[in-house]
Amino acid sequence: MWKTMAPLLLVLLFPILAQAADDRFKQGTWEIAIGFGSVAGVEPFVGYFLADNLEGILHFDYVHENLSNNGTTQKSDSVGVGGAAYYNLQTGTMVVPFFGPDVSYFNSHSSGYKNDSVQLTGDVGVRLLVGQRASVDIAGTGGYEWFSYSAGGFTSRFSGWLAGVKLAYSIFFYGP
């Protein structure tokens, strides 16, 4: 029940907390957000506007999956950390396009194996502004991943293209 209620509580609580914020895309503004990816994961992040419309982001990632192969199911947990730089194109409307690069490191483990990966992606999306202090962000992401898989003394390395969708809910706070 908590897994169902937590996102709902966040959506209801964020606009109330957001009343303490000031101008969204100005230098010195802070952003805190909770994001969700196309794989059932959660990505809390914090952003800081280094210049008007230009934001540096630090994100943390967690994904729990049940992987099935030939009738066998394994639970897998992945944790990651990454950084992004987004540029927001203010339009004077409640829809603000953004784009930027993102680099991430992930470590996954399950019984019998371990994965490490580095991802270099580009994100393109829109922020749907909510009230004076919040936004709902929808983005497509695509890029390249370098992957290392280890199990039973055997290690394999490979790489490939990846694509996905991200959804986030953000609130903004004016810095000192």
Image (spheres, rainbow, N blue to C red):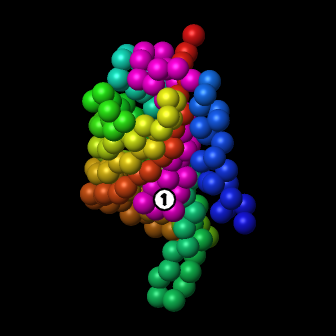
Q: Examine the rendering and report whether any part of residue 90 can be seen.
A: no
Crowding at label 1, few (<14), some or many (≥20) Cα neighbours within 10 Å? some
Does 30 lie within the magenta span?
A: yes
Q: Quadrant of residue 38?
A: bottom left
Q: Tell me the amino acid under the disc marked 1.
A: Asn
Up-down: is 25 above or below 158?
above
The residue lying at 41 percent from left, 51 percent from top is: 166
Q: Is the N terminus in the top left, top right, bottom left or bottom right quadrant?
A: bottom right
The residue lying at 32 percent from left, 33 percent from top is: 93
Does 25 lie within the magenta span?
A: yes
Q: Residue furthest top?
A: 176
The residue lying at 63 percent from left, 46 percent from top is: 12
Across and down, in percent, residue 120 comes to: 33, 44
Q: Is residue 108 left or right of residue 103?
A: right
Residue carrying label 1: 115
Q: Which of these two is toward me, 28 or 8? A: 8
Q: Residue furthest right?
A: 1
Q: For the magenta stretch, what is the residue range?
A: 21-47
Q: Residue furthest bottom?
A: 71
Q: Quadrant of residue 88?
A: top left
Across and down, in percent, residue 11 comes to: 59, 48
Across and down, in percent, residue 139 comes to: 35, 48
